[in-house]
Image (spheres, rainbow, N blue to C red):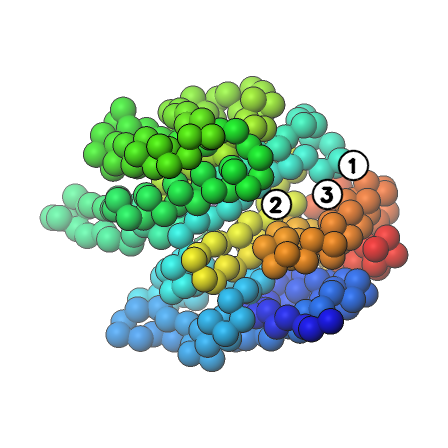
Amino acid sequence: QGKYTVTMIEGDGIGVEISAAVKDIYAAAKVPIIWEAVDVTPILKDGKTAIPDAAINSVKRNLVALKGPLATPIGKGHVSLNLTLRRTFNLFANLRPCRSVVGYKTPYDNVDTVLIRENTEGEYSGIEHVVVEGVVQSIKLITRPACERVIRYAFQHARATGKPKVLVVHKATIMKMSDGLFLSTAKKIAKEYPDIELGAELLDNTCLKIVTDPEPYKPVVMVMPNLYGDILSDMCSGLIGGLGLTPSGNMGDEVSIFEAVHGSAPDIAGKGLANPTALLLSSVMMLRHMKLNDYADKIENAVLKTIASGPENITRDLKGTAGTKHFTEQIIRRL
Ligand code: IPM
Ligand code: MN
């Protein structure tokens, strides 16, 4: 069997440890992947944060990358490296599923949500200025082409995963123009997908309804502008136990970068305490994207079984007592 080369962006802080856990588990599972580690320490190009060429070329060559947490460098001119990566590779759809982890108890035991966040513009466009002292503008830029591609992605995802409905989450009652364009674009695109129902819901109402009962959101693919997706995806993550358990994928037409959404946790970095689950489950999404489904199932099952196996085998953030190494070994035993 041939091997695939995948770019690995280990990330900062606990990134090194959780990436090592992924590599160990992949080696034990004999996944046909060769990791190509790249350094993304940013450079400033024309006054803007940029990714070094070697890293860009690696991602362009391999088309798939796995990414740990990146701390934003402090220093004049730098914007978040996470955002720079999304923009550099035109990763327009951020796919964030949340499914209850059997064996990790929360007040909700049946969560199965899928959220797709527009990933390149909206409130994250980075266009801000001072009008006069004490008066500022942060522009929420929305363009029809960006709405079209992310909404089309949502319909395609619904179709591919057998979900009957796409739900636009918006606030067009207030953001009449920007969210209005998002919503009207969805109505137009929906005509291309007669087999999928289109629904629309106000963001505040969605928050209220999901925390009250997530069940009705199971047959639904939610799609929304950037900032709403950032906030609502953390909320969904909270339903199942937090960012330590939730995967994500930044999807473009060519390149995809799968990433753990949590931070670099400098307080526990280097201490062998980090939980690699979010990165592992992101890598499972990556394997499915690469059509390596058997390996994906094998690794996902081993991770979930380990989490269900008791506090002595799981990390402290999950109220367990194990370190990264022990947790990793327990996963490998269950492959
Ligand atoms: C996320 C993160 C990022 C975002 C930060 C790190 C820039 O919170 O991926 O959700 O706001 O998109
Ligand atoms: Mn976020």
**Circle 2: residue type:** Thr
Q: Quadrant of the C terminus?
A: bottom right
Q: In the image, which is nearer the foreground, mark 1 or mark 3?
A: 1
Disc 3 crowd rating (10 Å Cα; few below 14, some 14-19, many 20+) is some
Please state which of residues 311 and 120 is positioned toward the viewer in this rendering. 120
82 is higher (above) or lower (below) than 61: above
* Residue 312, horizontal then vertical, whole percent: 86, 47
Helix, strand or loop under label 1: loop
**Circle 1: residue type:** Gly
* Residue 301, horizontal then vertical, whole percent: 78, 47
Please state which of residues 325 and 304 is positioned toward the viewer in this rendering. 304
Residue to which mark 1 is pinned = 103
Q: Are marks 1 and 3 in contact (CB under 8 Å)?
A: no
Q: Residue furthest bottom?
A: 54
Q: Residue at x 45, y 62 (%)?
A: 254
* Residue 252, horizontal then vertical, whole percent: 44, 56
Helix, strand or loop under label 2: loop
Q: In the image, which is nearer the foreground, mark 3 or mark 2?
A: 2
Nearest to N terminus: mark 1 or mark 2: 1
Nearest to N terminus: mark 3 or mark 2: 2
Q: Which disc is residue 271 wearing?
A: none
Disc 2 crowd rating (10 Å Cα; few below 14, some 14-19, many 20+) is many
Q: Residue at x 26, y 44 (%)?
A: 144
